[in-house]
Image (cartoon, rainbow, N blue to C red):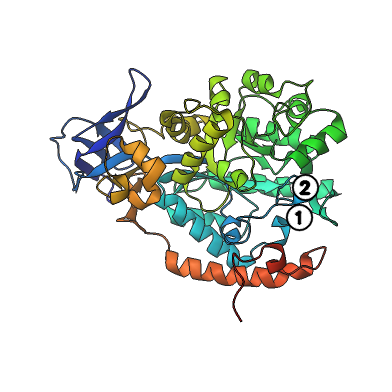
C-alpha cells in the first residue's frame, strides 16, 4: 500500500462501533468504515471523500480486531490429538508436569507450530497477540512476517519441574541460569520494542510462580516497571502449584506475590483460577479474591486448556463484578479466539449455575478494549476515528450465522472462524477471503504432523516409566490389524 491509501468499507451490514460518549461498543447498520493508512478515519455515516480502494460491506460484519493477552504458539498446536483427554490422575488432572515436558517440537517443528498457530489466530479475528515463548532463532521474523501486532513475552525461570513417579513434582534449581536467561529475555524485549515495523513490543514474563526465585520475580517486575512494559507470570494455575507454594511459604500463590510487592497494577496473572476460595482447595483463612480486587492486577483467562481436564474458573462473572481486569487468551490449541470466548461464556454459566452470570458483551469487551487496556494500549480494540486500523470482517450470510438476529452472538456461539473472511492490521490486509497471506497453512500443517511423529518417537525415552505414547494417550479406537 502507498503512504496515503484510503480504504472505504461501503454499506457494511453490521458494524461494532465504539461510542466515545457512552464509552462502549454499539451496533451500526448499513453504514461505512473508512481507514487511511494505519488509522481509522471514519466509522458510521456515508463517506464522500477521495478513496483508493472500496470494499463492498453488504453481507459483512465489521468488528474491531481481537486482543489476545496469553498464548503459546511455540508448541501447543502439536499437542492436538495427544492431550485432548489426558491429565495426570495423581496430580489433580493437570498435564503440566508428567506429559507436557515430554512432548515438545524440535527446531523444525517449532517453526511449523508457530506458523499454524499464527494462522489460526488470524483466521479467528485476532489482530494483537501476546506470545509467551522460550526465545528461538526466527521468532521475531515469524511474528513480523505474520503481520500481527505482537507482544513478545520471552519466558525464563530458575528451575525446571519434573516427576519421577507421576505423583510427586520435583524442581531442579539453577538460579544463575535463570538470571542469565532473564538478561537474554531483556535483549529480546529491547529488539522487539525497536523493531522497524512498529507492530512488535515486549513483555517481561518469568515463567511460573513455582519455578522462579523470589529475587527473580521481584527483579523482573522492577524491570517491567522501569521499561514501561507489562509483566505476566503464570500463577494460581494448578492445585499442584497452590500446594507447592503453601508448602514452601505458608502463603497462597497470590499472597506470596503480594508479599514480593508485584501484585499491583501493571502485572498480569496467567490464569488466576486457583484462589483460596476455589472448591478444589481448602485454605479458608486467606482472601485471594479481595487481594485481586484491591490490587489492580489483571487476569489472563484461557478456559479451553482447563476445561479439557474438568477444571474451570469460579466464575468469570464474579471476577468482572469485582472490578478485576480480565482479558482473554488462547493458551492451547486450537488458537481460536472466538471459540475461547464461547468457552469462557459457557463455563462461567455452568460454574455459577446462573445463565446471567456472564453476557456476550462482557467477553467481547474483555477480548477487545479490556485486553487493550491490560496491555497499556488505548489505540486498539475499538473502531473509532484515530484508532489503529485493526479489524476483521465476517460473512453474515454464512449458514452458521443465520438466522441472523444478533451478529456477535451468532459469531461467538455458532459460526466462529468459519465466518471470518478478511482481516486488516495497521490498514494492511493479512487475511483475504479466508486465506492467510503470510503462510501456506496446508504446508505448515503437513510439517507439523511430521514433527508430531518425531516427538512420539522421542517420548518413550523421556518418560520416567518408559511408556509408549499410545499407552499414555490411546487412540479413540484400536487400529484394526
In this rendering, the answer to whether 284 lies above or below 214 is above
Q: Decide if residue 58 is on the left or right side of residue 398.
A: left
Q: Which residue is identified by label 1?
A: 98
Q: Nearer the viewer, residue 340 or 180?
A: 340
In this rendering, the answer to whether 212 lies above or below 455 is above
Residue 136 - label: none
Residue 413 visible here: yes
Q: Position of residue 441 (x, y in %)?
A: 43, 64
Task: Sort mark 2 into few (<14), some (14-19) or many (20+) by Cα contacts within 10 Å.
Answer: some
Residue 198 visible here: no
Q: Which residue is identified by label 2?
A: 91
In this rendering, the answer to whether 48 lies above or below 143 is above
Q: Nearer the viewer, residue 351 or 426?
A: 351
Q: Decide if residue 390 is on the left or right side of residue 219.
A: left
Which residue is rendered at x = 66% and y = 22% of the image?
289
Q: Position of residue 128 (x, y in %)?
A: 46, 43
Amino acid at each position: 500500500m502507498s503512504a496515503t491509501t484510503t480504504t472505504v468499507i461501503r454499506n457494511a451490514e453490521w458494524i461494532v462501533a465504539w461510542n466515545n460518549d457512552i464509552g462502549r461498543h454499539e451496533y451500526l447498520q448499513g453504514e461505512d468504515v473508512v481507514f487511511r493508512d494505519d488509522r481509522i478515519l471514519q466509522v458510521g455515516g456515508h463517506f464522500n471523500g477521495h478513496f483508493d480502494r472500496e470494499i463492498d460491506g453488504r453481507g459483512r460484519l465489521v468488528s474491531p480486531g481481537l486482543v489476545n493477552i496469553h498464548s503459546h504458539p511455540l508448541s501447543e498446536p502439536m499437542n492436538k490429538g495427544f492431550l485432548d483427554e489426558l491429565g495426570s490422575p495423581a496430580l489433580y488432572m493437570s498435564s503440566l508436569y508428567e506429559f507436557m515436558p515430554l512432548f515438545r517440537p524440535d527446531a523444525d517443528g517449532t517453526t511449523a507450530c508457530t506458523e499454524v498457530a499464527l494462522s489460526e489466530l488470524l483466521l479467528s479475528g485476532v489482530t494483537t497477540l501476546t506470545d509467551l515463548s522460550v526465545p528461538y532463532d526466527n521468532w521475531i521474523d515469524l511474528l513480523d512476517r505474520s503481520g500481527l501486532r505482537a507482544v513478545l513475552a520471552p519466558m525464563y525461570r530458575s528451575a525446571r519441574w519434573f516427576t519421577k513417579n507421576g505423583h510427586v513434582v520435583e524442581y531442579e534449581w539453577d538460579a544463575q541460569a535463570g538470571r542469565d536467561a532473564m538478561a537474554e529475555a531483556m535483549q529480546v524485549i529491547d529488539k522487539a520494542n525497536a523493531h522497524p515495523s512498529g507492530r512488535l513490543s515486549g513483555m517481561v514474563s518469568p515463567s511460573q510462580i513455582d519455578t522462579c526465585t523470589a529475587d527473580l520475580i521481584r527483579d523482573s517486575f522492577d524491570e517491567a516497571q522501569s521499561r514501561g512494559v507489562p509483566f505476566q507470570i503464570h500463577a494460581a494455575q494448578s492445585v499442584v502449584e497452590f500446594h507447592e507454594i503453601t508448602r514452601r511459604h505458608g502463603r497462597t500463590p497470590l499472597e506470596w506475590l503480594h508479599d514480593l510487592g508485584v501484585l499491583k497494577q501493571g502485572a498480569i496473572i496467567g490464569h488466576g483460577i486457583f484462589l483460596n476460595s476455589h472448591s478444589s482447595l481448602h485454605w479458608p483463612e486467606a482472601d485471594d479474591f479481595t487481594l485481586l480486587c484491591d490490587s489492580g492486577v489483571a487476569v489472563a483467562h484461557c478456559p479451553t486448556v482447563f476445561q479439557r481436564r474438568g477444571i474451570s474458573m469460579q466464575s468469570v462473572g464474579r471476577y468482572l463484578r469485582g472490578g478485576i481486569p480480565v482479558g482473554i487468551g488462547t493458551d492451547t490449541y486450537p488458537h481460536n479466539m472466538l471459540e475461547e470466548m464461547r468457552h469462557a461464556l459457557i463455563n462461567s454459566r455452568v460454574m455459577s449455575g446462573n445463565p446471567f452470570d456472564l453476557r456476550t458483551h462482557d467477553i467481547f469487551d474483555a477480548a477487545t478494549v479490556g485486553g487493550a487496556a491490560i496491555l497499556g494500549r488505548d489505540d486498539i480494540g475499538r473502531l473509532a476515528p484515530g484508532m489503529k486500523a485493526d479489524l476483521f470482517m465476517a460473512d453474515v450470510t454464512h449458514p452458521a450465522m443465520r438466522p441472523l438476529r444478533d451478529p456477535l452472538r451468532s459469531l461467538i456461539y455458532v459460526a466462529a472462524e468459519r465466518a471470518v473472511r478478511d482481516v486488516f492490521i495497521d490498514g494492511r490486509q493479512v487475511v483475504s477471503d479466508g486465506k492467510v497471506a503470510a503462510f501456506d497453512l496446508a504446508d505448515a500443517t503437513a510439517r507439523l504432523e511430521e514433527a508430531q511423529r518425531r516427538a512420539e518417537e522421542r517420548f518413550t525415552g523421556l518418560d520416567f516409566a518408559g511408556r509408549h505414547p499410545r499407552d499414555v494417550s490411546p487412540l479413540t479406537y484400536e487400529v484394526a490389524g
